[in-house]
Amino acid sequence: MKVVCPYCDSYIEADENMNCPNCGGSVSAEVKEAEDLLREEEARRREEETAQQQKMQEEERGMRLLELVLGAFTGAMGTRRGRGLIRAMINFFTRGKKGGMF
Ligand SMILES: [Zn+2]
């Protein structure tokens, strides 16, 4: 763990049980603090990753639901008119704003 020695201000590599190689001062508090910070950062990163994964899963679920609905439409109305409606629905979902026909 890289820390700054509080006694001589050297930037040193140390662990909790080590003293500063420069001046011999105890740096265990600094090492502990740095490790805590690192742990917090890692926990935050993990949280962000989990949130992102959940978001992706939700989007996937949404797509699957959309496919299901479209599939049901295709099955129910395998006609030319039905296909036109499905195409209009796909446009509605992909372009978003132009949903005038609904
Ligand atoms: Zn020192």
Image (cartoon, rainbow, N blue to C red):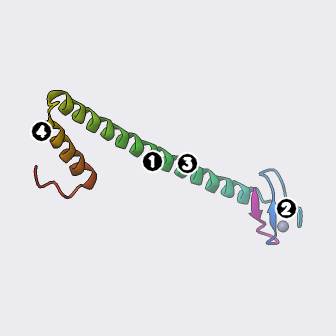
Q: Earlier in the sequence, mark 2 or mark 1?
A: 2
Q: Which mark is residue 52?
A: 1
The quadrant of the picture showing ligand 1 is: bottom right
Label 4: state its secondary structure.
helix
Residue interval drawn in magenta: 1-8
The numbered mark, 2 or 4, whose residue comes first in the sequence reads 2
- Dominant SS type (magenta): loop
Task: Tell me: is circle 2 under 8 Å from ligand 1.
Answer: yes
Q: In the rendered view of the protein, which quadrant contains the N terminus?
A: bottom right
Which one is nearer the viewer's eye here, 65 or 26? 65
Mark 3, mark 2: which one is toward the viewer? 3
Q: Which residue is label 3 attached to? A: 43
Nearer the N terminus, badge 4 or badge 3? 3
Q: Which mark is residue 83?
A: none
Q: CA distance from mark 2 to mark 1?
A: 41 Å
The residue beneath circle 4 is: 81
Looking at the image, is mark 4 or mark 3 nearer the viewer? 4
Q: Are marks 1 and 3 in contact (CB under 8 Å)?
A: no
Look at the picture and state if 54 lies above or below 76: below
- Amino acid on which the number 3 mark rests in the picture: Ala
Mark 4 packing: few (<14 Cα in 10 Å), some, or many (20+)?
A: few
Dot 3 surroundings within 10 Å: few (below 14), some, or many (20 or more)? few
